[in-house]
Every structure is written in structure tokens, then in C-alpha cells.
Image (cartoon, rainbow, N blue to C red):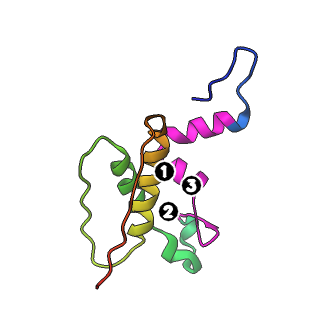
């Protein structure tokens, strides 16, 4: 992954990066922000001020998107941050497959 020579050692930063690649949710939590703030899936102690950020079900979508599943279908009633989840999943996939020089595109649909 890092193309180290026998004299080079793995740094804590390299190890942390490699460990976050194992789980897509860990990768997203470590490397992504929304409007400059860290992403949150779980709000501890049910803090009412942050209740909107409590979306533990998004983790399942991210993990399914990163798996070998060809299609991931989500049935929902309204916008619940799924655009961010989709983009994060694509970025994770592109990063984990970067040795193949992959490219990605995500198009946001409009009503027009």
C-alpha cells in the first residue's frame, strides 16, 4: 500500500489510515466532514440538541455500498442525508480501489 523500502518503518499515521480502510464507516468518520463539522451517525445519551444527527441506519447503507453488492436500494420517505452517504460511499470505493486508477462520477438530479 505504501511502497516502503526495507529501511522505512510504518508510522502511526500510516497504520491509522490502513485500519480505517477496513471499515467504510470508520473511513467516513475519519476523513469526511459536512460543512466543516465531523460526520455523526450516533448521538450518545440522546442529546435532544443533536437529535437530527442521530442516524445510525446510515452506517448500514455505507457498509452495503462498500460491499460486493451490485445494487443497494433504499426506501425512504424524505431526504435524510442520503446524498452525503452516497458521495461518501463512492469516495471510499474510489480510495480503496485507487490502485486500479478508478474514476467516479456522482450526478445530483434536479427537478428540471
Which is more foreground, mark 2 or mark 1? 1
The region drawn magenta spans 14-42
The picture places residue 69, in percent across and down from the top left corner, at: 26, 45
Residue 17 magenta: yes
Q: Are marks 2 and 3 in contact (CB under 8 Å)?
A: yes
Q: Quadrant of the N terminus?
A: top right
- Pointer 2 residue: 41
- Who comes first in sequence, dot 2 or dot 1? 1
Residue 25: which numbered mark, if any?
1
Which is more foreground, mark 2 or mark 3? 3
Residue 31 magenta: yes
Rendered position, 50 above or below 13: below
Residue at 36% x, 67% y: name it: 107
Rendered position, 27 above or below 45: above
Q: Are marks 1 and 3 in contact (CB under 8 Å)?
A: yes
Q: Are marks 2 and 1 in contact (CB under 8 Å)?
A: yes
Residue 29: which numbered mark, if any?
3
Please indicate whether residue 84 sits to the left or right of residue 35 in the image: left
Rendered position, 75 above or below 68: below
Task: Kindly state the secondary structure of the residue where label 1 is placed.
Answer: helix
Mark 2: give few (<14), some (14-19) or many (20+) Cα within 10 Å: some
The picture places residue 99, in percent across and down from the top left corner, at: 48, 34
Please indicate whether residue 98 sits to the left or right of residue 63 in the image: right
Mark 1: give few (<14), some (14-19) or many (20+) Cα within 10 Å: many
Task: Kindly state the secondary structure of the residue where label 3 is placed.
Answer: helix
Task: Tell me if I can see residue 38 in this picture.
Answer: yes
Give the Cα separation between the discs numbered 1 and 3. Answer: 6 Å
Residue at 58% x, 80% y: name it: 49
Amino acid at each position: 500500500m505504501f511502497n516502503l523500502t526495507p529501511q522505512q518503518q510504518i508510522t502511526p499515521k500510516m497504520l491509522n489510515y490502513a485500519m480505517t480502510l477496513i471499515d467504510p464507516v470508520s473511513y467516513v468518520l475519519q476523513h469526511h466532514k459536512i460543512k466543516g463539522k465531523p460526520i455523526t451517525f450516533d448521538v450518545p445519551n440522546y442529546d435532544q440538541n443533536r437529535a437530527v444527527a442521530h442516524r445510525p441506519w446510515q452506517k448500514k447503507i455505507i457498509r452495503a455500498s462498500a460491499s460486493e453488492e451490485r445494487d443497494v436500494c433504499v426506501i425512504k420517505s424524505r431526504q435524510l442525508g442520503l446524498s452525503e452517504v452516497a458521495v461518501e460511499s463512492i469516495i471510499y470505493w474510489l480510495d480503496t480501489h485507487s490502485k486500479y486508477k478508478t474514476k467516479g462520477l456522482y450526478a445530483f438530479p434536479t427537478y428540471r
